[in-house]
Image (cartoon, helix red, strand yellow):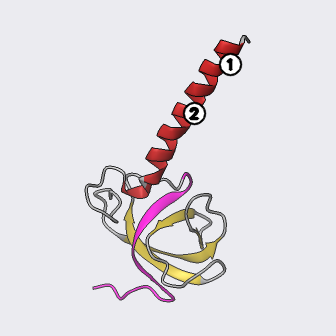
Amino acid sequence: MRGSARTAWGLRLVACGAVFAAVAACGPNLGSGEAGAPDRAPEAQSCVRGSLTAEGVECPALRARDGGLYTLAGDLKGFEAGDEVCVCGAPAMVSICMQGTTIVLSHIGRDCPPTD
């Protein structure tokens, strides 16, 4: 590759990297229109029991009792990998988590909230 072609290729990579970094900085709030609130799917909230794990690439993760992998968007309220918890929330429509089903947390605790 000639010097000018290498320089042009390098500039393209830098430009693409800058765009990627800007989009990644938006995090799970991309397109939500509300700070701190990821877009949510119109589905009803549900609860899942399992163990918090370190499996998440970009987000905290929960391995459900049935083996399913969920990534979590929201405050873990001091819980950490290894803790057995119940998480409740709606699936995120947009997420940077890159794996599993992302749940936008409305509840995390040792027990699930009572149902009506």
Picture coordinates of residue 34 (x, y %)? Answer: 26, 61
Q: Residue at x 45, y 76 (%)?
A: 75
Q: Is residue 92 visible?
A: yes
Q: In this rendering, would 52 be left or right of 103?
A: right
Residue closer to the observer: 52 or 28? 28
Q: Is residue 95 visible?
A: no
Q: Residue at label 2?
A: 14
Residue 35 falls in which quadrant of the image?
A: bottom left
Relative height, residue 59 to residue 95 (above, below): below
Q: Residue at label 1?
A: 6
Q: Residue at x 56, y 83 (%)?
A: 79
Q: Magenta segment, which residues? A: 98-116
Q: Secondary structure at mark 1?
A: helix
Picture coordinates of residue 85 (x, y %)? Answer: 54, 82
Q: Residue at x 71, y 14 (%)?
A: 3
Q: In this rendering, would 5 be left or right of 72?
A: right
Name the amino acid type tagged 2: Val
